[in-house]
Amino acid sequence: MSSAASLLRTQIEASLANRIPGALTMRPMTAPETIPIGIGELDQQSVAIPRGCLTEVCGSSSSGRTTLLLSLIREVTQKGECCALVDTSSAFDPHSALANGVHLGRLLCVRCAAPHPKLNPIEKALRASYCIISAGGFGLVVLDLADIETYRAQRIPLATWYRFQRAVESTSAAFVVMEKQPFAKSCASLVITLETQYSKWAPTLGQPQNPKLLTEAGFTARVSRSRIDVSRRKPASNSSTEFWVATSWAG
Amino acid sequence: MLFASIFIPDFSLQALFAKRPELQAKSVALIDGTPPLLKVVAANDTAMKAGVAVGLLKAQAEAVGAEPILRSPDLEDSVHTVALTCARQFSPRVQDKCADLIIVDIDGLNSLFGTPEEIANKICSWLKQERLSVNVGVAGNPDTASIAARGFQGVTVIAQAKQMGNVSVTLLGPSEQALETLSLWGITTLGKLAALDAKALSQRLGPSGLVLQKLARGQQVNPFVPDEEQLEFHEKTELEYSVDLLDSLSFVLASLLERICARLEEYALATNEIDYEFTLDPPRVAGKNLPEDQLLYRRTLKLSNPTTDRKRLLRHIQLDLQAHPPAAPIMAVSLRAHAIRPRHTQLGLFAPQSPDPDKLELITARLANLVGEDQVGSFELLDTHRPRAFVMAKFEPDKASDQVPPSRGWSPKVALRLFEPAKQATIRLRSDIPLQLTFDGKRGEVIEHSSPWLSSGEWWNEMVYSRKEWDVEVQFNDGTRGKFLIFVDLQTNQSFVDGSYD
């Protein structure tokens, strides 16, 4: 009986080979290649962005999302790869990017905030992201929805996120969505949640009564979901990593 | 090797008389310059006899009865094109040296046009029909041929350098200092210069002296670099009924592009520039007739990478038409492709991945169609201290410099996230200290702040700015906390939140 089943399976696979190679064969799960974020504390904890997967970076305003993103873009452009940023709110500051060591010549930016007769910024951003991912050749594609109100971002159908997941899994690009809350649900392979910590304000001339200067900002990163671990271990819910980042004028 | 050099003496004047032969009998002074300082740059014999000289002012030329005519670069270009066309009738290997000098490689043309002298005579008679009197020099290298054309009238075939012995050294174009030295030595002709000892000449005039002597001895100094002829492939069609839908027009465009691409492939060429011209249907233009000049719709499509891919070209034209649609239905379509050599890129096995240049161009065109042409590209910072001073440049990762910031010792920096446009806010200040911030319907107490930072500039243009800014940390009433860059515009005295530190 088993030999008949095996024969049938072989015949089905052979007939479908052109369209679906190995249709009935279990594919071994392999850990995807990852890109280090470039922030020492997170790299030490092996928090890295997987290629060919959808990653969500969530957090409220001033929670360090943009800082993490610029560090990631720097890592990719430093290697000579190209990045694409779909900026829904046109919030990207190239001066900050340059201070973070981003190679601006290798960053394709699509600013979607300008008014359009038919499409709203979110629709434009989603279309632009899909177009870039489908074209291939980029090491990192970032969709910035960080300033979009939660209720509007929640209206993005789950099917859209599945489309993105399917499109990106056949490429070597990492697709990162920056937002206030995770919206992609099970389509996301990795969800990093960021929170703000207290920041350091130092007196300019060493005396407490002198005017202060923002010198460092503290953030906390927590991996809320990770499906990139082959062993299928769930991330510890309390495993958060604190990191401090200096301002460009503080050196 | 054998070269013929075509020299048109008094080029500006000859160009004028070739196009306006009725002026030849008159006393004509050609003038050039910026009014009112118009000076005589050339004059015909009649004018010269009347006392006109090069360098005279327009009024002075008029005073002696010469008719001043403004020099026309367009007219000279058209005559130059005629001369180039003539040269290309004889050989495809033509070097356009300058407006009045063209060099032609005539090696191996004996069986077609006869001896070198016959070829030179044919060139002369061809151009004579165009009312141009030219000198043609024939020699074994382009430099000697050029000297012969400049130094002798009519047709001259140089078999030995000795033939140029009596030609003046000024034809070699020496520097003023070298010319003065040579005239002090009594060296006025090429024959005398060629006879000098090379070592002694080099010691006195340096390398430039040796170059002059090489030319005088009939040796080649400058290489012959033939120009590539600009090929164009043109296809047009007239429609029985006007077309007003892009999908319908695409079928017409596709068939024209298919023919153009097939011809390009026959020549082993590609195109990176297509001019397309549509004749619009006048009666259906919103009930009124368009002026004649608006009946034609012209656009040019330029690509970074030359291609013969019909689908790619069609997609680019479709995207361009979607962004810039014509004002009326189309009656006739004309495409003109500028042909160039295809570009081949050597890829590396270990090179980092980057988008395919052909695909990238199509994607950026699609994205530009989606969000606007000025909203796609890579950031280019402007050389100013003005906030938000950047423009979007074309995204060309291949051309981006390889200079990347050093990775060693680098650490991330807190990033600013801009509000586009800056959000209007209410800042409660006491002695330049921000106490409370209200924006976006939220109110918060300032718990930390920096001292005010004053910046101003560009008062000399409309981009003038003057602002007082603070970095603040705000605790909002809803319990959230954030770090912001706030500023007061000192020109309007309005307060804004520029962005958040994120």
Image (cartoon, coloured by chain):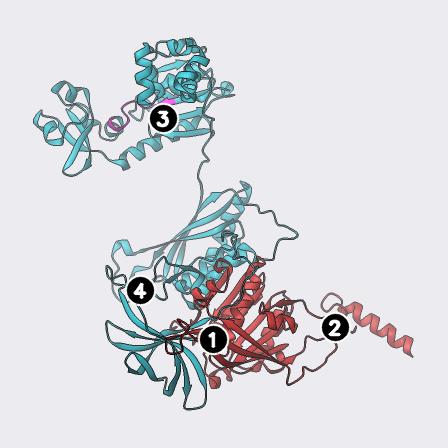
**Amino acid type at mark 2:** Met
Q: Is residue A10 above or below residue B197?
A: below
Identify which amino acid the numbered label 1 is placed on.
Asp
Using residue B500 as the reference point, say whether residue B457 is left or right of it: left
Residue B284 image label? 4
Q: Amino acid at mark 4?
A: Arg
* Sequence-first tag of 4 and 1: 4
On the image, numbered disc 1 is attached to which residue?
B502
Can residue B118 be seen here? The reply is no
Q: Which chain is cyan?
A: B
Check disc 3 and give the amino acid type.
Leu
Local crowd at mark 3 within 10 Å, few (<14), some, or many (≥20)? many
Is the Cβ of the residue at disc 4 closer than 8 Å to that at disc 3?
no
x, y (%) of residue A56?
57, 77
Identify the magenta region: B6-13
Q: Which chain is red?
A: A
Q: On residue B101, which mark appears?
A: 3
Please identify the residue farthest to the front as the structure is shown.
A207
What residue would you read off at disc 2?
A: A29
Residue at 41% x, 20% y is B206
Q: Earlier in the sequence, mark 1 or mark 3?
A: 3
- Whole-percent x and y of residue A60? 49, 82
Chain for numbered disc 4: B
Name the mark nearer the viewer: 4 or 3.
3
Instruction: Check disc 4: other Cα within 10 Å, few if <14, some if 14-19, many if 20+.
Output: some
The residue carrying pointer 1 sits among few (fewer than 14), some (14 to 19) or many (20 or more) residues within 10 Å by Cα, namely many
What whole-number distance in Å separates the C-alpha atoms at marks 4 and 1?
56 Å
Q: Nearer the viewer, residue B150 or B460?
A: B460
How far separated are the C-alphas under marks 3 and 2? Answer: 72 Å
For the residues marked 4 and 3, what is the alpha-carbon distance in whole angstroms?
Answer: 52 Å
Location of residue A33 with respect to B26 vertically, above or below = below
